[in-house]
Image (cartoon, grey):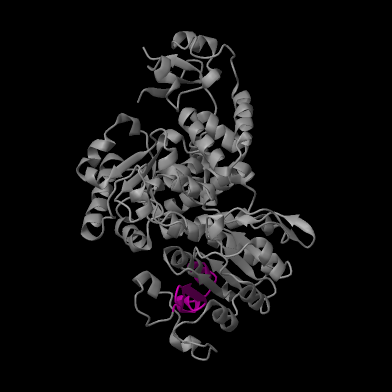
Amino acid sequence: MSYKLITGKDGHAYIETNLRDFALVNNSMLNKGMAFTSKERLEFGLLGLLPPHEATLETQCARSYEAFKSKATDIEKYNYLRDLQDSNEILFYRLVLDHITEMMPVVYTPVVGQGCQLFSHVYRRPRGLFIAYPYRDYIDKIFENSRFDHVKAIVVTDGERILGLGDQGAGGMGIPIGKLSLYSVCAGIHPAQTLPILLDVGTNNQELIQDPLYIGWRHERIRGKDYDDFIAAFVRAVKKRFPKVLLQWEDFAQLNANPILEKYRHELCTFNDDIQGTAAVATGTLLAAVQVTGLPLQEQRIVIVGGGSAGCGISNLMMHAMMEAGLSEEQARSRFYLMDRSGLMVEGAAGFMPFQQEFMQKKSAIADWQVADANNITLLETVKNAKPTVLLGVSGQPAIFTEAVVKEMAAHVARPIIFPLSNPTSRSEASPSDLMKWTQDKAVIGTGSPFPEVTRNGQAFRVDQTNNAYIFPGMGLGIIAVEASRVSDKMFMAAARALAECSPAKKNPSANLLPPLTGIRDVSFRVAFAVAKQAIAEKLAKSFSDDELEKIIRAAIWTPHYVPYIASK
C-alpha cells in the first residue's frame, strides 16, 4: 500500500504516505482537492498544482452538489458521480451520504441500469478488476497487487442478468461498483476494503459484440464445463488471496446463480444477493406489512410472479418465517403460488430446476379451480381461485399486475399487500399510483424501484422501496466485524426480523413499512448486530458479549472525513 492510517503521539489519526505531487492528487482514496492544508501542500509538492484557496469538506460538498444539480439528465448525474468517485472518494461518499434520498436512485437503481448499458461509451478510469476468460491462468497474478491487501468485501458478476435488462457483458461492472458504494454509504465499510469484480466470460448480446466501442471480450458466452472450471479457478484464487473475505455474487443468470451458491456456500463466506438479500428485504418488509393488516403471517396466501432464483429465494425464507410462526413445512409450502411465463407452476411440469420444483402447487390442491386451461393457469385465474393476501412480483414483466388482477385481489381481502419488486422502474409490475387507485387506497405497497409519493386518503405518502440496500450492507458489516466463516440462512432471517423491528409501522399502523433512507446507517447497524449475534449462536464466529459486539461493530463503521497527512520517512 502507498499509504496507511496511523495514530500519532497526540492520539489523533493521520495518514502516512510516500506519494507526492500528481501521484498524490491522482489517488482517489488520498486526494483532498483544495482541502489540502498549506503545510501539506508544501510537504507533498502540491504548491502551484492547486488554487490557493483552502477549502473545507463542507464547501467542497456544496460545490459538488451544485454541479450535480446542474446536470440535465439522470445519466449525466450518474456519470458525474462516477467521475467524482474516481477522483476524490471521501468527497463522493460524504456528498452521497448527505443527499442519500436524492442520490441513491442515481448511484444504484434505476439509473445504474442505464449506466451498465452505456458503460463502454462512458468508460474513463479503471475501477475494480476485469477477469476475462482468456486470463483464466493468471488470476493469482491479477490478485497479487499490494493494493488489495485490505480487501474484506468483494462483489462479483458475470454481467448476464443485469437487473431486468439482461446480458450487458462487461458493462455489468456497473453493478459491483454500485453495490460496493452502498456498502460504504449505508454501512460504513471503508472503500479500500471493497473490490468490484467482473468475470468476463463473453456475451450473447449481439449489439454489444457489434459495437466498436465495446470494452469486453468479443466472444459468445462460455458455457458448461469451461464456465464451471473458470468459476472454480476464480473461487480457488479468492480463497488463497483473501481467506476471510465476504464474497457476494450478483446478477448471475438463473442457470448459474443457484448452482454456484449451493456449490460454494460451504467453502467460503459467501452469498447471492439476488436470491438471499432480496428474500430478506422482502420478508422483513412483509413482516412489517403483516403488522399493518392484522392478519397473522401463518394465514397469509402468497402469489409470487416470477418463479426463478429470486422468487424461490423469497418463498423459501418466508416459508421458514411461517414455520417459526407455527405451521408445518407442508402447510407453509401450500400457501405459496409461484408463476412463471407459462402460468402457475404445478407439480409434474417439465423444464424446472430442483429448487423450483419445491414450490410447485400440488395438482390435488387446485383440482376444483375454475380455469380455462389446466396446463396454463393465468395470473388472473390464480388470483380468483387462491384469493391471495399477498401479491409479489420479481418477473421483470412491466405492468403484469393489471387493473383486473388487482381489483380481483382487493375484492377478497381488506388490505391487499402488493409488492411489485422488479427493477429498474421500467420493469415494475405496476405503478404505486395505479395500485392505490384500483384498491381505493387500501393497498399496502412495497416497490423494487423508487417511485414518487402517492396520495393516500387525501394525504401525500412516501412509497416504500424494498431496496436490498436495507439488508446487504448491514449483513456485510456484521459479517466483517466478527469475521464470520460462513453465511447461513438463519443469518438472513435475523436480518429480516431486524429490519421489521425498524419499521415505523410497528408503532403506527398508518406509517411507512420501512424507515427513510436518511436513517439507513442506523438500520444497517441493527441488521449487523442481529446478523453477528446469529453467526455467534451458530458458532460461525468468535463469541462476544453484547457490549463487546456493539463496540466491535461501531469501530468498523467508517465516516467520510479528511485527516492530516504526514510523509513516510
Residue furthest to the left in view is: 137
Measured along the vertical axis of the image, is residue 242 above or below residue 411?
above
Query: What residue lies at 64% left-to-right and 48% top-to-bottom?
Result: 516
> What segment carries the magenta color?
320-345
Q: Position of residue 288 (x, y in %)?
A: 62, 61
Residue 226 relative to residue 335: left or right: left
Residue 329 falls inside the magenta stretch: yes
Residue 403 falls inside the magenta stretch: no
Q: How many marks?
A: 0
Residue furthest to the right in view is: 458
Residue 455 visible in this rendered orientation of the protein: yes
For residue 60, which quarter of the picture? Answer: top right
Query: What residue lies at 71% left-to-right and 61% top-to-bottom?
Result: 509
User: Which quarter of the rendering shows the N terminus?
Assistant: top left
Residue furthest to the bottom in view is: 368
Measured along the vertical axis of the image, is residue 510 above or below residue 57?
below
Measured along the vertical axis of the image, is residue 79 above or below residue 495?
above
Residue 542 visible in this rendered orientation of the protein: no
Q: Position of residue 317 (x, y in %)?
A: 48, 65
Query: What residue lies at 50% left-to-right and 71% top-to-bottom?
Result: 323
Q: Position of residue 120 (x, y in %)?
A: 40, 42
Measured along the vertical axis of the image, is residue 273 above or below residue 366?
above
Asked whether 353 or 113 is in front, the reply is 113
Q: Position of residue 552 (x, y in %)?
A: 48, 39
User: Which quarter of the rendering shows the C terminus?
Assistant: top left
Asked whether 422 or 188 is in front, the reply is 422
